[in-house]
Amino acid sequence: MGDLHPPVWTEAETLQYWWSMRRAMESAGDRTSAIYKRSVAITEGQPDPLAANGTLR
């Protein structure tokens, strides 16, 4: 097995991911889950509410 490294996303790719997640959750009618609240915070430029000391984004 070779070296396994997690993908490195740019800030733009990360934001695009969270926008996609947010839209999908809204389409499904989910506006109360932690992952939805996380997607809203990130897409609005707020700190990640699930990150320790705001380290995840």
Image: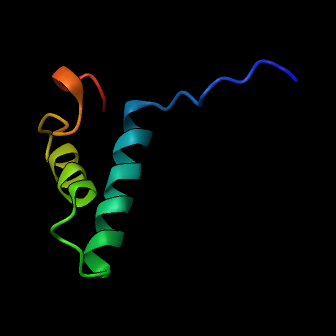
Position above or below: 53 against 41: above
Q: Is residue 21 above or below residue 49?
A: below
Q: Position of residue 40 (x, y in %)?
A: 18, 54
**x, y (%) of residue 41?**
15, 47
Figure coloring: rainbow
Q: How many marks?
A: 0
Where residue 55 sits: x, y (%)? 26, 22
From the viewer's side, name the closer residue of 45 and 50: 50
Please say if 33 is above or below 12: below
Say which quarter of the image contains residue 19. Answer: bottom left
Q: Quadrant of the C terminus?
A: top left
Identify the residue at the far right of this view.
Answer: 1
Foreground residue among 52 and 39: 52
Residue 36: quarter of image: bottom left
Name the residue located 88 percent from the left edge and 24 percent from the top edge.
1
State the residue at coordinates (45%, 30%): 10
Q: Residue at x 11, y 38 (%)?
A: 46
In the rendered image, residue 34, in percent from the top left (x then y), is placed at 21, 55
Question: Along the horizontal axis of the image, is 16 left or right of 2?
Answer: left
Q: Is residue 6 left or right of residue 26?
A: right
Q: Is residue 14 above or below residue 27?
A: above
